């Protein structure tokens, strides 16, 4: 099956710093989403981004489907950004299976 | 819309008992997913439905697990009999194009 790898696995930032999280996938995908799992365990949608670039406040994401990767940018990080960031992909057509990467655990220090 | 609604939020049960987890998807969504999250295995897809029909249940661990979707607004995941190794957070998600997750059910089997 498709492999979804995220890097780095862990990241510690000082408040106000910027960061880039990466998601590599081993096959072509139809859908790609970024999620934030907050410290209370909720999975929150960040971006639905099978291709192109989107921005939402301090967060932005870019997916280059032809090169099989996606990037999540966090600017001016805040302590509330702490948690685990997951990339999830749907491979091919005729299927709706979201396959999750192993996540990037982010801790933002005050 | 209230989002994906799962119940109960927490469940503690004794080994051997039957456990039923419930999910109400977002109205209008045509796909529904059950995931399990553990520290060791991350987010695993157990089963997904499209238009109330089970499409892929290859992630269901064993015969003790069963899932149903009798109509477009309700799904259940049942474990019978439950075992301590079933302890995990179980998420339900629904999608039309973009997937949204419920708050999860934290199951503890003692």
Image (spheres, rainbow, N blue to C red):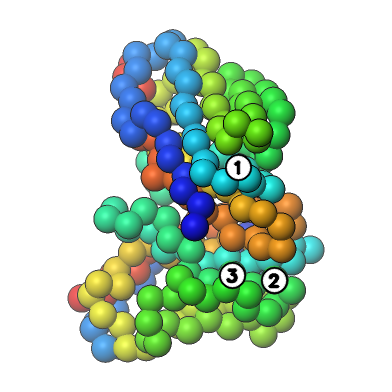
Label 2 – label 3 distance at C-alpha: 7 Å
The residue beneath circle 3 is: B48
Q: Residues within 10 Å of mark 1 (few under 14, many from 20)?
A: many
Q: Are marks 2 and 3 in contact (CB under 8 Å)?
A: yes
The residue beneath circle 1 is: A33
Q: Looking at this view, is B41 or A57 the one in front?
A: B41
Q: Residues within 10 Å of mark 3 (few under 14, many from 20)?
A: many
Please report, as a chain letter, where disc 2 is located. B
Identify the residue shown where x is 71% and y is 63%.
A94
Q: Looking at this view, is A32 or A27 the one in front?
A: A27
Percent coordinates x, y for residue A32 in the rendering: 62, 43
Identify the residue shown where x is 26% and y is 80%.
B83
Q: Are callouts 2 and 3 both on one chain? A: yes
Query: Which residue lies most toward the right here?
Result: B28
Please report, as a chain letter, where disc 3 is located. B
Q: Establish if A7 lies above or below B40.
A: above
Q: Are callouts 3 and 1 both on one chain? A: no
Q: Establish if A5 lies above or below B89.
A: above
Q: Secondary structure at mark 3?
A: strand
Q: Establish if B62 lies above or below A2.
A: below
Position of residue A65 in the picture relative to residue A105 (left or right): right
Label 3 – label 1 distance at C-alpha: 17 Å
The residue beneath circle 2 is: B50
Q: Looking at this view, is A23 or A82 the one in front?
A: A23
Q: Secondary structure at mark 1?
A: strand
């Amino acid at each position: 099956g498709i492999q979804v790898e995220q890097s780095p696995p862990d990241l510690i930032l000082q408040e106000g710093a910027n960061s880039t999280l990466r998601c590599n996938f081993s096959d072509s995908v139809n859908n790609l989403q970024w999620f934030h799992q907050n410290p209370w365990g909720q999975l929150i949608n960040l971006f639905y981004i099978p291709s192109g670039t989107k921005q939402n406040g301090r967060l932005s994401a870019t997916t280059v489907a032809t090169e099989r990767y996606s990037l999540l940018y966090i600017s001016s990080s805040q302590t509330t950004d702490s948690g685990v960031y997951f990339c999830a992909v749907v491979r091919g057509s005729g299927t709706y299976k979201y396959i999750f990467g192993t996540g990037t655990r982010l801790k933002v220090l005050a | 819309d209230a989002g994906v609604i799962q119940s109960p939020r927490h469940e503690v049960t004794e080994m051997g008992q039957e456990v039923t987890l419930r999910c109400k998807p977002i109205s209008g969504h045509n796909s529904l997913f059950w995931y399990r999250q553990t520290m060791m295995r991350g987010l695993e897809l157990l089963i997904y439905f499209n238009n109330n029909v089970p499409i892929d249940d290859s992630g269901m661990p064993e015969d003790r697990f069963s899932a149903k979707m009798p109509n477009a607004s309700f799904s259940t995941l049942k474990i019978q009999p439950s075992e301590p190794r079933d302890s995990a957070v179980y998420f339900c998600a629904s999608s039309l194009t973009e997937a949204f997750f419920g708050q999860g059910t934290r199951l503890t089997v003692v």
